[in-house]
Image (cartoon, rainbow, N blue to C red):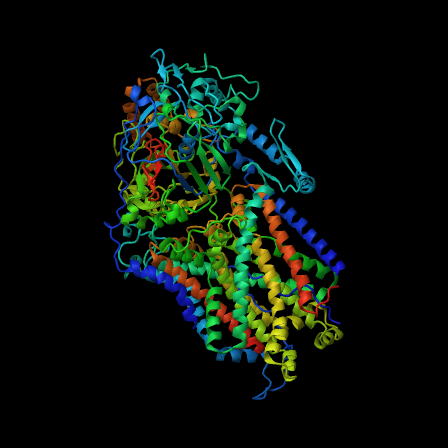
């Protein structure tokens, strides 16, 4: 008999916009029809079905294209820099007035500076934006992937192991959930940096970025782990697993070749919804001074700096605000569509 | 439909966008001139009229109401022995009285007069070595007991205690010259002995005897360490939280990091006080808001905030909106006695050529714009502030405000300068400023790394003698308006200690040290010109560090705050004669 | 039930102990000494030593830890060999020398602020979010549904600091419709309490109700497609009864879970909301204490936050069993 699990298999959402996702049930394992020629009207695997559904979804298409465009722009930022001949950190303080506000109309927008200049430092907003987006997307994607990888690994082990190992992992999950992320990040980032770098060493921007990714991953694997654990518990008594076991497959094979292919769908959904959550959380880190450090451009820090100018130079607030909003919205929409496509029951 | 939801938010922004989008931002529109630099004609007055209470009334002032002072962070110390920050001293001035104090009206003409004492100090033998102060009649503490000169002596004695070491130590150093101020005498707590050189023949008299002449004694007596602390009320480390009142107000409640409330001290007699008018019934200091929130609230001037003010500089994001007619008349702005330097660690950068190259490489305009432009200050070319007595404007190097890259190349002559580490406090504004400085120096051909330091320990870190940094921005303001509290603390190499240094350039040159001693022995009248000459000599021959800009302040207050002016002595809104408009 | 509760409580206590050890170890590794930060400028070695003695930092970390734990149950006295002495009564979570107050006194000031923010916001987001989600699930495909999805996606894609600041500018700074947020104890003046907190409630409430609307809509849709709902309808039960009695009950279970955990986590400090609206709650207090290396406050607040989460977890588990008869506690 399946043991009823008293620990809810659900994520804790955060007030910063981490979308709550519903635990998904994948109904049937992927029974890849081996050696069987697919007939025109049946025989599509759930994966293929999902892909078809996704392709038909207009929202998904629009948000995917939007994301693709933004990602390409972010990746091409060095090319854009070359083309425009403006570096992201290049100050144009001569184009600021005595109060350090950009001269001219609409936050200094003109043919040279398409989105205007930052007040204070006089940096080109467009260049800060594309480079900043690159940093933010890198952090969000990397953290989401690492968190999912850890979560999957631990979840599979916990689900398959039963007994004391399962209990122990569950307890570690509880522990992680009960530990305040912000305080941990505040304390650990300076400690680690001091240990790795001397007082005069330039701490490379990549190091802080890696630290942020690691901190995010350390606190975000729990949800995926719980999800995967639940799935594995549901699947491990299934016939195909027993068949594999009877055929003499070792545990590793069963875990990663038999079970994992059957639970990738919810993992993918979680991953796609984690990315926007990390983008916004990364912006929140700038709030407590532990975000990406100057002079590396960063969308999160830009948002934090620009929001104070909402009344004095709203154009400065508008561009990064709009960018992060579109990014997060598109990711959320795509994640939703993905879920709908993978789980036909909850389609609109 | 999704757009619609989005439009809600964007719509809010759009209102603001259309409001500003149609007008070009021009150079004239936002010219934030920081006001004329007023050279302080600070003088010491022995006139009976200046030295007698009550303080001169303010036209149209009324009694009553409560003034709220909104601050980002709590005071570090209110204990008079530990009080060495201008806003703390302005606050302390309401609670306790020193031997001397400043009568000000914001015009730049301030007078040093007797506060507890009947005059700013009598030079008994006319050699500046023995100073006598006579206390006024009718001085009372908050419990009604009389203020005794023995309490003043106790206050000074306890300022030697190692655990109360944060205050100014001029008198202390003069009493024990040579070596650290408390190397010999460590305060009254262990054994109860009083410091040598202080006599209290009766309850009204206190006499100081120095080995060397110190003609600055009246100024030093205006610092809070000469405030009376009765031995019975001395709570040592905890005195910070509730100083015993000898002034017009006493502590009603004090919740650290939250709020400090002052209420009237009924035993204070206006007739004994030539400095304070004490119009409001009380003061409330609130801590914990961001400077942005404070400035926005004061700009908005909602009824609840109309009797409020702040000592924090208006943040750059709010500055452009302070020119509106109904806001501009509620701004107190002007130069202060502070100068900001790009400190150069002379222990690491020993070559004057490099410092000269840095002087030309620094984009002062960008460094200022990062923190609000001209309302934050004006480019500096001297070590002493324009507010210093005897100040003379000179410019040895004639660098343009935006720097001169070609000149840097010329000076370096093809040699590669050493890689530099620029340390900065990690607040948002200082970070932006450090990045502006870094960008300008990189443009000039230097290799610069930024190093952020937690703001609470910034000065501790750069104040360590063997700190690993090359450059750091730091500010210094005189304790009284003569060069004697600028040049010696900053450039007397003999004062360099292992930690807690003010000489952040770690500059030490025998000829300068001798010159400092020579000036100190001059008659007061000749000192001002001599300090200016020394400033010029330092700039020309040594360039110990890079003067970056003369500080200016830009503070907002509500529409019900009356007689708000910048204190010439403290460079922030003065509270002594402020009132609430009824 | 009793056995289940005992086990869960025990596990919770072990979790808390583990967290306290981690926090202790973490801050023990901080490079700058809290004594030095406290002692300030011009601090000589002797003064630092004195402050360190007073803070108990000179003892080995294990001793410090056991003293701390003991203090929770029997209280403790801080002394440094001089006349200085401070008594901290049980439950003593430490003594903050910067404030010259017991940490429990500081908590009693800040915790009500955070609780007030969270309770108000939670009521908003549960009422609005869940009902919006449920109704739009029942009216799937209608304009109402689309609008609700649109708003909730917008909300879920926004950040507290962005939305909160826009509200401040629109309602406080520019129009003066609302006063700047402030905290008045409920017992002192309920009207002022609500007036001062309305902005944080709306901000947190709106953003979270968006999340909850999406969640409950999806949950409800899933439930409606379940066999038992179909069965109930096939049996001829009135639609309203099917929805309220059967579907709602099933759909609400996971929402309760998430709400419980969310509320628990928020009670540990809503730092960004508190900062934006200048309210001194648990979150702001803790982050500032980290800056000052005011360790007693940090350790105590982290523990308190963990207690909230552990207790919320426990309550959720119990509620789960009450709402969902399929779950039997064993």
Residue A290 vs residue C69, the one in the foreground: C69
Q: Is residue B54 left or right of residue C83?
A: left
- Res B83 quadrant in image: top left
The quadrant in which the N terminus of chain A is found is: bottom right
- In this view, B198 is above or below C164: above
Residue found at the very far bottom of the displayed protein: A40
Residue name at image x 60 percent, y 66 percent = C255
Res. B470 visible in picture = yes
Q: Position of residue B249 (x, y in %)?
A: 43, 31
Residue name at image x 33 percent, y 54 percent = A312
Q: Is residue A178 left or right of residue B259?
A: right
Q: Is residue C274 left or right of residue B539?
A: right
- In this view, B14 is above or below A49: above
Residue A259 vs residue A120, the one in the foreground: A120
- Res B356 quadrant in image: top left
Res. A192 visible in picture = no
Residue A136 vs residue C103, the one in the foreground: C103
């Amino acid at each position: 008999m399946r043991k009823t699990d008293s620990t809810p298999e659900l994520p804790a959402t955060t007030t910063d916009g981490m979308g709550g996702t519903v635990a998904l049930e994948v109904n049937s394992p992927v029974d890849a029809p081996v050696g069987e020629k697919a007939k025109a009207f049946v025989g599509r695997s759930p994966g293929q079905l999902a892909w078809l559904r996704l392709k038909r979804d207009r929202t998904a298409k629009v948000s995917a294209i939007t994301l693709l465009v933004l990602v390409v722009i972010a990746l091409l930022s060095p090319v854009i820099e070359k083309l425009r001949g403006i570096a992201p950190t290049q100050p144009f303080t001569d184009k600021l007035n005595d109060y350090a506000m950009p001269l001219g109309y609409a936050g200094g927008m003109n043919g040279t500076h398409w989105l205007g200049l930052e007040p204070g430092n006089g940096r080109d907003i467009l260049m800060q934006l594309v480079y900043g987006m690159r940093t933010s997307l890198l952090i969000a994607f990397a953290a989401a992937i690492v968190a999912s990888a850890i979560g999957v690994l631990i979840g599979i082990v916990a689900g398959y192991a039963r007994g004391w190992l399962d209990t122990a992992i569950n307890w570690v999950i509880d522990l992680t959930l009960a530990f305040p992320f912000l305080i941990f990040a505040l304390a650990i980032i300076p400690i680690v940096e001091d240990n790795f770098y001397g007082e005069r060493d330039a701490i490379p921007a990549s190091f802080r970025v890696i630290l942020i990714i690691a901190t995010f991953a350390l606190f975000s694997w729990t949800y995926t782990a719980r999800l995967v654990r639940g799935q594995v518990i549901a699947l491990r008594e299934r016939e195909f697993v027993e068949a594999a076991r009877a055929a003499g497959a070792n545990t590793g094979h069963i875990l990663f070749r038999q079970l994992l292919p059957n639970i990738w769908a919810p993992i993918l959904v979680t991953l796609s919804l984690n990315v926007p959550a990390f983008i916004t959380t990364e912006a929140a880190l700038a709030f407590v001074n532990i975000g990406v450090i100057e002079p590396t451009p960063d969308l999160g820090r830009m948002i934090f700096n620009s929001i104070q100018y909402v009344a004095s130079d709203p154009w400065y607030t508008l561009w990064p605000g709009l960018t992060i909003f579109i990014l997060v919205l598109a990711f959320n929409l795509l994640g939703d569509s993905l879920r709908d496509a993978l789980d036909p029951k909850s389609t609109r | 439909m999704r757009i619609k939801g989005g439009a809600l938010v964007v719509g809010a922004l759009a209102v603001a966008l259309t409001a500003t989008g149609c007008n070009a931002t021009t150079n004239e529109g936002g010219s934030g001139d920081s006001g004329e630099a007023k050279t302080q004609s600070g003088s010491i007055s022995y006139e009976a009229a200046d030295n007698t209470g009550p303080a001169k009334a303010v036209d149209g002032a009324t009694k009553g109401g409560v003034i709220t002072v909104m601050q980002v962070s709590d005071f570090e110390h209110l204990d008079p022995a530990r009080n060495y920050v201008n806003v703390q001293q302005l606050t302390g001035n309401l609670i306790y009285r020193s031997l001397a104090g400043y009568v000000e009206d914001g015009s730049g003409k301030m007078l040093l007069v007797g506060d507890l004492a009947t005059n700013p100090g009598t030079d008994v033998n006319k050699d500046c070595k023995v100073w006598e102060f006579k206390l006024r009649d009718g001085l009372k503490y908050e419990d009604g007991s009389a203020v005794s000169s023995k309490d003043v002596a106790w206050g000074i004695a306890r300022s030697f205690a190692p655990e109360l070491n944060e205050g100014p130590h001029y008198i202390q150093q003069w009493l024990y010259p040579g070596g650290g101020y408390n190397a010999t005498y460590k305060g009254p707590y262990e054994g109860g002995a009083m410091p040598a050189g202080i006599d209290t023949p009766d309850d009204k008299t206190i006499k100081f005897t120095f080995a060397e002449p110190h003609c600055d004694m009246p100024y030093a007596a205006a610092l809070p360490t000469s405030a009376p602390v009765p031995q019975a009320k001395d709570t040592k480390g905890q005195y910070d939280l509730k100083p015993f009142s000898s002034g017009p107000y006493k502590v009603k409640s004090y919740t650290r990091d939250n709020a400090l409330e002052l209420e009237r001290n009924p035993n204070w007699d206006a007739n004994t006080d030539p400095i304070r008018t004490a119009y409001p019934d009380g003061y409330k200091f609130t801590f914990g808001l961001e400077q942005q929130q404070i400035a926005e609230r004061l700009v908005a001037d909602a009824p609840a905030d109309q009797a409020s003010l702040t000592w924090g500089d208006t943040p750059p994001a709010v500055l452009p909106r302070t020119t509106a007619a109904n806001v501009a008349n509620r701004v107190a702005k002007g130069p202060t006695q502070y100068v900001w330097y790009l400190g150069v660690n002379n222990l690491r950068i020993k070559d004057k050529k490099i410092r000269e190259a840095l002087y030309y490489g620094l984009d002062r305009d960008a460094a200022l714009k990062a923190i609000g432009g001209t309302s934050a200050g004006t480019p500096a070319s001297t070590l002493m502030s324009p507010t210093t007595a005897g100040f003379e404007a000179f410019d040895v190097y004639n660098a343009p405000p935006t720097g001169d890259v070609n000149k840097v190349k010329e000076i370096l002559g093809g040699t590669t300068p050493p890689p530099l580490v620029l340390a900065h406090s990690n607040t948002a504004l200082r970070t932006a400023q450090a990045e502006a400085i870094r960008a300008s120096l990189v443009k000039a051909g230097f290799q610069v790394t930024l190093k952020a330091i937690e703001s609470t320990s910034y000065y501790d870190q750069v104040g360590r003698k063997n700190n690993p940094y090359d450059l750091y921005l730091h500010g210094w303001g005189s304790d009284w308006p003569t060069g004697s509290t600028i040049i010696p603390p900053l450039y007397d190499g003999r004062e360099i200690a292992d930690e807690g240094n003010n000489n952040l350039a770690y500059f030490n040159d025998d000829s300068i040290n001798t010159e400092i001693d020579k000036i100190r022995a001059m008659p007061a009248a000749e000192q001002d010109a001599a300090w200016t000459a020394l400033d010029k000599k330092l700039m020309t021959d040594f360039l110990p560090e890079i003067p970056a800009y003369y500080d200016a302040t830009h503070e907002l207050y509500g529409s019900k705050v009356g007689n708000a002016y910048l204190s010439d002595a403290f460079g922030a809104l003065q509270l002594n004669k402020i009132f609430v408009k009824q | 039930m009793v056995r289940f509760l005992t086990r869960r409580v025990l596990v919770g206590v072990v979790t808390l102990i583990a967290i306290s050890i981690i926090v202790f170890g973490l801050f023990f590794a901080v490079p700058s000494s809290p004594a030095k930060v406290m002692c300030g400028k011009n601090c000589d070695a002797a003064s630092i030593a004195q402050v360190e003695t007073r803070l108990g930092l000179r003892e080995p970390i294990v001793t410090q830890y056991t003293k701390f734990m003991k203090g929770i149950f029997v209280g403790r006295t801080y002394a440094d060999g001089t006349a200085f002495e401070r008594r901290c009564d049980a439950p003593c979570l430490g003594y903050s020398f910067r404030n010259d107050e017991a940490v429990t006194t500081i908590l009693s000031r800040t915790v009500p602020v955070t609780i007030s923010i969270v309770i108000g916001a939670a009521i908003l987001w549960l009422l609005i979010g869940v009902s919006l989600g449920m109704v739009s699930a029942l009216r799937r495909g209608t304009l109402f549904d689309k609008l609700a999805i649109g708003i909730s996606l917008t909300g879920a894609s926004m950040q507290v600091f962005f939305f909160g600041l826009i509200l401040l500018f629109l309602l406080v700074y520019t129009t003066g419709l609302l006063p700047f947020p402030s905290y008045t104890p409920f017992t002192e003046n309920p009207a002022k309490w609500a007036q001062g907190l309305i902005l944080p409630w709306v901000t947190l409430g709106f953003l979270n109700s968006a999340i909850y609307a999406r969640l409950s809509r999806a949950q409800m849709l899933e439930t409606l497609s379940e066999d038992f709902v179909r069965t109930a309808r096939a049996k001829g039960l009135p639609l309203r009864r099917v929805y309220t009695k059967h579907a709602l009950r099933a759909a609400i279970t996971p929402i309760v879970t998430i709400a419980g955990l969310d509320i628990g986590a928020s009670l540990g400090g809503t730092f960004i909301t508190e900062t934006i609206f200048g309210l001194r709650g648990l979150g702001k207090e803790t982050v500032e204490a980290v800056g000052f290396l005011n360790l007693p406050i940090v350790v105590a607040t982290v523990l308190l936050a963990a207690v909230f989460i552990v207790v919320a977890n426990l309550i959720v588990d119990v509620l789960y069993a009450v709402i969902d008869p399929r779950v039997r506690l064993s």
